[in-house]
Image (tube, helix red, strand yellow):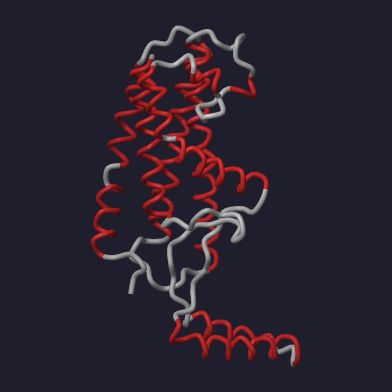
Amino acid sequence: MSYISPDQIAKIMELFGQIEPKYNQLLFRFAHRRYGNERAAEYAQHGYSRRLGTLKRCIENVFALIAPDMSDVPERNVLYDAQINIQAFYANVYGSIDNLAWLWVFERGLEASIPRNRVGFRAKNTELRRTLSDGFRGYLEGLDTWLEYLIEYRDALAHRIPLYIPPGNVPRKHLDEFNKLERQINEALYVRGDGFEYDRLRIEQQRLLAFQPLITHSVNETTGMPIFHAQMLTDFITVEEVGYKMLEEL
């Protein structure tokens, strides 16, 4: 049985089907806008817009590798490939928001008055936020929790524990059998040095796991383990929304 309910899966797939047209429409808007500053245009067209394409492709790759209704534990290399795409996704979500902040700085000629290490849209970036309209500033304040979650996952990826997909959890009804196999696995490997038996037992033990499509980093530092299909779609839509708000602000 899938970890995600049928209604949730249907909603996820509905949103997934909207990603391609959302990307195309937003790409068109940023590509055809006339910018007053060459560096602003670069951040818009070669920064933010290029990252949008990366975000879209990462989502497509993850959905192709691990379907939202998957219940069996994916093969190890499938998990690795999905993790690579998710890691690239988070790096570029973070980068896309920063690109929009730099777009604003260059288009408004603020590069001399705002230090480089103070450019951004987070609550701490008070110098930049003061240059925005009340409406956009209020909108960003409503995103403060999302921005901090984004920083948590980006910083963990870049500096601490990389993002990963836990391979599976043990249902309570299989716990005793799982632990029994664990003891046999350790004996096969460390006592008898029997690699063939070790591999056989590991495969048997793996069948007891139930897959949950969650993403995390450090078990001690994370604030949550989101369902990555839904979270990636939500993050893309948020990046899209911030992009349209920036166009309005400009």
The C terminus sits in image quarter: top left
Residue at image position (36%, 33%) is: 240
Coordinates of residue 19 in the picture (x, y in percent): 32, 41
In the image: residue 202, left or right of residue 11 = right
Q: Is residue 50 above or below residue 15?
A: above
Name the spot of residue 116 as percent of width and height, x first: 63, 20
Give 49 or 4, whichever is nearer the viewer: 4
Q: How many labels were placed on the picture?
A: 0
**Residue drawn at the location 42% of the way across and 23% of the way down:** 137
Is residue 1 rendered to the left or right of residue 73?
left
> Can you say whether 143 is above or below 127 in the image?
below
161 or 47, which lies in front?
A: 161
The quadrant of the picture occupied by the N terminus is bottom left
Q: Position of residue 152 (x, y in %)?
A: 56, 45
Q: Is residue 227 above or below residue 108?
A: below
Report x, y in % for residue 85. Answer: 50, 50
Measuring 61% from the left and 43% from the top, which residue is drawn there?
A: 155
183 or 194, nearer to the observer: 183
In the visual, does 38 lie left or right of 53? right
